[in-house]
Image (spheres, coloured by chain):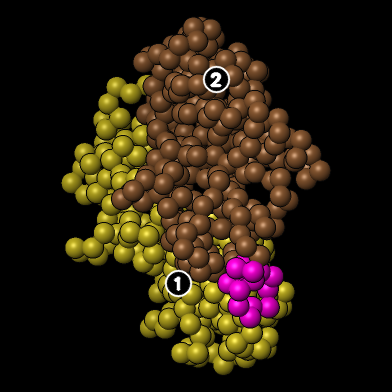
Chain colours: A yellow, B brown
């Protein structure tokens, strides 16, 4: 049977999502906890968004396949359902900076990565005019100069839509950088923090941090409003665009279609993007 | 002239508010930063709520008196107002876990401690049924057993009002434990965290953590609903009430009367409570 796991982590002390020998990664911690909770030798999960070193997640999703008998046996004589027992046991094993929000049985055609129809990230910046909340300092970038969000939103409007984001993506062989950027919008929080909401069908590698770095340069007046559009049109990665620090970035939510549409969706994305970096 | 400073801190790595030789305290850090920003030998502040080791603050308030010429000189040739320049300079000096939200000129009769008419704290618990946000784990108490908030709210209703809170206060000579507990109410946040909002005119030492410890014992079923009322009536501190951990506690806001009422307010509180622990 297929299990969907909704989980969250503080990326500060992790070398990103992906398993790397000898390094502390979220995948490493989660798979080790799953193997222990299920009393199996090893567990492999597929994740919706492979985050970089230092990036956080509140609404991350993964799936794994489990023998139903193994799941029931691992729950012991707990009065909860086997998936609720799994959630509880995982949170007892996992370190404090990773938490499982929910485990649930998923349809056979649910794939955490290829079924996803959108990903929503937020990027938080405390600029010169804002005082960040010290209790949330690990998820906010501190920026010395003031940012003009109106100008940044005007520049962001030139970037949204179905476009080739080669300029904003780390190149990978055999993959395209065509993505549907549905939303890229800055707002002031009540405490003065500038928060970007970024939604796309999928993101290529370092795309959000690259978009944010470009808009910060415009918002602080170092670049003109038209610079974002020009960079996008160039369709070439440029060293002039600085990657924004991972500490301000959080994967907030991943969207999936209704269960009835999962099978059709999976056939489409698997065919179209087998070689793609779909995150 | 009198300056009011609104500030926030993550209490995790502090030995509480109050200055202690050789220990890292919020008062120590703030006064050192003020002395440096104002280029004076030392600075002394009066705070609204003296928090214990590990307790956080989002809406803490203090005041200090500054020679207007010293303030103007410290601002240099900055285009901002001298108080805004002070805020900016303080945030440049202070460690990342203390942030000044605002500095402002206050009326001569404003006293951060004695002018306050209410203090609002929040206490956050992630119990067995909740998954806390790992990015906010430093301000949430993790509790293994499930809490029944309806029962806790029923017990809390027996504690609100103008009462003698001797049971819930660390005894201090010459001070009374009569306080007006205006609100004590538990709610479930969207992520399942149980959050108590606690408002009183003032709190005696360790009162919030003692009230929360009492209600947690009732909410997890270890004590009956009437236990809170019985303990209050006993008017004696009891070892049966466990202090809840400081990590879940945050001072969120301090209320003051309109400026025109400050002078009258100050005469009342100074006379009535000179020897009191007014926090």
Q: Is residue B80 magenta?
A: yes
Query: Which quadrant of the figure contains the N terminus of chain A?
Result: top left
Q: Which residue is mark 2?
A: B176
Q: Magenta segment, principal secondary structure?
A: helix
Reply above or below: B194 against A254.
above
Q: Is residue B142 left or right of residue A201?
A: left
Residue B42 visible here: yes
A240 w.r.t. B275: above or below: below
Task: Name the foreground residue: A252 vs B214.
Answer: B214
Measuring from the top left, give residue A7's x and y in whole percent: 43, 48
**Is residue B224 shown above or below A201?**
above
User: Which residue is found at the position 45% from the left and 44% from the top?
Assistant: B17
Q: Nearer the viewer, residue A241 or B274?
A: B274
Position above or below: B85 against A38: below
Q: Label 1 belongs to which residue?
A: A245
Q: Quadrant of residue A161?
A: bottom right
Label number found at residue A185: none
Residue A147 drawn at (x, y percent): 63, 75
Residue span colored magenta: B69-85
State whether residue A178 appears in this view.
no
Q: Secondary structure at mark 2?
A: loop
* Residue A129 image position (x, y, % from top left): 63, 68
Task: Rate crowding at label 1 as few (under 14), some (14 to 19) or many (20 or more) other CA atoms within 10 Å.
Answer: some
Chain of the residue under label 1: A
Residue in front for this viewpoint, B159 or B151: B159
Q: Given contact means CB atoms under 8 Å apart, are the residues at marks 1 and 2 in contact?
A: no
């Amino acid at each position: 049977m297929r299990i969907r796991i909704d989980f969250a982590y503080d990326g500060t002390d992790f070398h990103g999502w992906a398993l790397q020998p000898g390094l502390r990664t979220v995948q490493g911690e989660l798979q080790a906890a799953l193997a222990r909770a299920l009393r199996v030798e090893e567990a492999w999960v597929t994740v919706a968004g492979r985050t970089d070193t230092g990036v956080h997640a509140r609404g991350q999703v993964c799936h794994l396949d489990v023998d139903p008998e193994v799941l029931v046996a691992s729950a012991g004589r707990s009065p909860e359902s086997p998936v609720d027992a799994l959630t509880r046991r995982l949170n007892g094993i996992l370190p404090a900076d990773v938490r499982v929000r929910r485990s649930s049985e998923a349809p056979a055609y649910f794939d955490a990565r290829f079924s996803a129809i959108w990903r929503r990230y937020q990027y938080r910046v405390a600029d010169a005019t804002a005082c960040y909340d010290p209790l949330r300092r690990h998820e906010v970038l501190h920026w010395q100069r003031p940012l003009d969000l109106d100008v940044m939103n005007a520049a962001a409007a030139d970037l949204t839509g179905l476009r080739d984001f080669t300029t904003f993506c780390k190149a990978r062989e055999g993959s395209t950088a065509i993505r549907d950027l549905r939303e890229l919008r800055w707002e002031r929080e009540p405490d003065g923090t500038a928060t970007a909401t970024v939604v796309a069908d999928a993101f290529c590698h370092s795309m959000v941090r690259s978009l944010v770095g470009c808009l910060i340069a415009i918002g602080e007046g170092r670049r003109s409003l038209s610079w974002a559009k020009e960079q996008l049109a160039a369709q070439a990665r440029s060293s002039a665009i600085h990657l924004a620090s991972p500490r301000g970035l959080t994967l907030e939510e991943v969207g999936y279609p209704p269960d009835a549409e999962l099978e059709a969706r999976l056939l489409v994305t698997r065919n179209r993007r087998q070689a793609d970096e779909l995150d």
